[in-house]
Amino acid sequence: GGTIGILGGGQLGRMLTLAGRNMGYRFVTLEPGPDSPCGQVADRQIEASYDDVEAARELAKVSDVITYEFENVDAAVTKLLTQEAYVPQGSSLLYTTQHRLREKRAIEAAGVRVAPYAEITSVQELHEAAARFGMPCVLKTATGGYDGKGQWVIRSADEVPAAFEELSRAGTDLVLEQFIRFEHEISVIAARSPRGEVKAFPAAENIHIDNILHLSIVPARIDKRIQDEAERLAIRIAESMEAVGLIAVEMFLTEDGELFVNELAPRPHNSGHYTMEACHTSQFEQHIRAICNLPLGYAGLLTPVVMVNVLGEHVEPLLKWIGQDESGAEASGVTAKLHLYGKHEAKIKRKMGHVNLLTEDYDLALKWIEKSGIWNS
Ligand code: ATP
Ligand code: MG
Ligand code: MG
């Protein structure tokens, strides 16, 4: 038992809470938005901004263990929490993954490859690095980016000044990456506990639309040898960084079978939602087990699965489709497990939920998606 405090009130906190309640824990979330996805299912929500030090102190007081569900936790709050509460994940992994350059150096220190990159501090440097890497290349802000925000794919030298000016406006460091012509994007989520036990979930094959995750397919449609290699890389990173809790590792796989790490997330990850019904242990239960220093659960797969994300524009047609007989398992060969996050406004592109499609044959799941007509744009 005991109380787990969560910094952040979004869907990741919600699903952590739902998993942890089954294990007998109580939950308090710190989140500014009223009636948040996590607050709806937690025992209590402290309604305050994430950088409110007094609110963080209150969270520390009522929690036996503290975790977070997003990366951009304020440094002052992190410091206070690590001093006044038990934060098994510590602050150093967070510090590393908050900044792309620090993150890349840490990945390299683990002996794992990233795309060639350069720190950029002037237009001149950007011209030089772009010439070195070739076109296209990707300029990224070092901090604060998500869903492809804070990025510019530079396709010719003409774009260099505009790209530099635009991204400089964010006021953070910049990093240029070589563009990797990947065959597949995959991710592996690993968990590590304070006692040093490590387990990786099966690699997911990820398909994005407009830089937002659309599908995760598991097992990934790649060589078993490469799946195993990807899982080993994630474990190596978790161990080298002495991660506690979950760490998600996004990777590119090239035609030649080479893996490059794109980025890390020290928390549950959208591409791990498939684990909720398709694995012996979900990523959320695994995270709770890890931060509470319990033995980790078996991370093996129970069934092939396709996870499809539900954005604001998909909610209405989805509810209609789910209500029709042809979407049912008997008719389609696919068991659809629906997850909605309790968000009130179905804004376009906003993550509202996901569906895990359990199936013996993922072509059936892909057909289910196509037949629904919901994601055909
Ligand atoms: P997330 O929402 O996953 O945190 P993000 O904004 O941090 O996204 P990245 O994951 O760095 O962004 O990039 C978004 C997508 O852009 C990647 O999933 C990939 O499809 C593409 N991309 C990013 N960097 C590269 C690269 N160096 N080469 C090729 N494609 C890339
Ligand atoms: Mg990211
Ligand atoms: Mg990413």
Image (cartoon, rainbow, N blue to C red):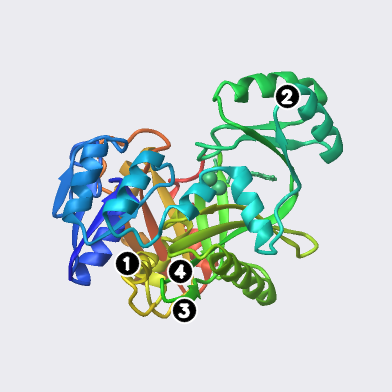
| Residue 193 appears in view | yes
- SS state under label 1: helix
- SS state under label 3: loop
Q: For the residues labelled 2 and 3, say whether their Cβ atoms are less than 8 Å apart.
A: no
Q: Which residue is mark 3?
A: 300
The x, y position of residue 304, in whole percent, is: 49, 72
Looking at the rendering, which quadrant does residue 297 occupy? bottom left
Label 4 amino acid? Ala
Residue at (37% x, 70% y) in the render: 290
Left or right position of 203 against 27: right
Left or right position of 254 against 4: right
Mark 2 vs mark 4: give the one in front: 2
Disc 2 to disc 1, C-alpha distance: 44 Å
Q: For the residues labelled 2 and 1, say whether their Cβ atoms are less than 8 Å apart.
A: no
- SS state under label 2: loop
| Residue 321 appears in view | no
Is the N terminus in the top left, top right, bottom left or bottom right quadrant? bottom left
Disc 2 to disc 3, C-alpha distance: 47 Å
Q: Which residue is mark 2?
A: 122
Label 2 amino acid? Ser
Is 108 placed above or below 21 here? Answer: above
Q: Earlier in the sequence, mark 1 or mark 3?
A: 1
- Few, some or many residues within 10 Å of mark 1 (<14, 14–19, 20+): many
Q: Earlier in the sequence, mark 2 or mark 3?
A: 2
Q: Earlier in the sequence, mark 4 or mark 3?
A: 4
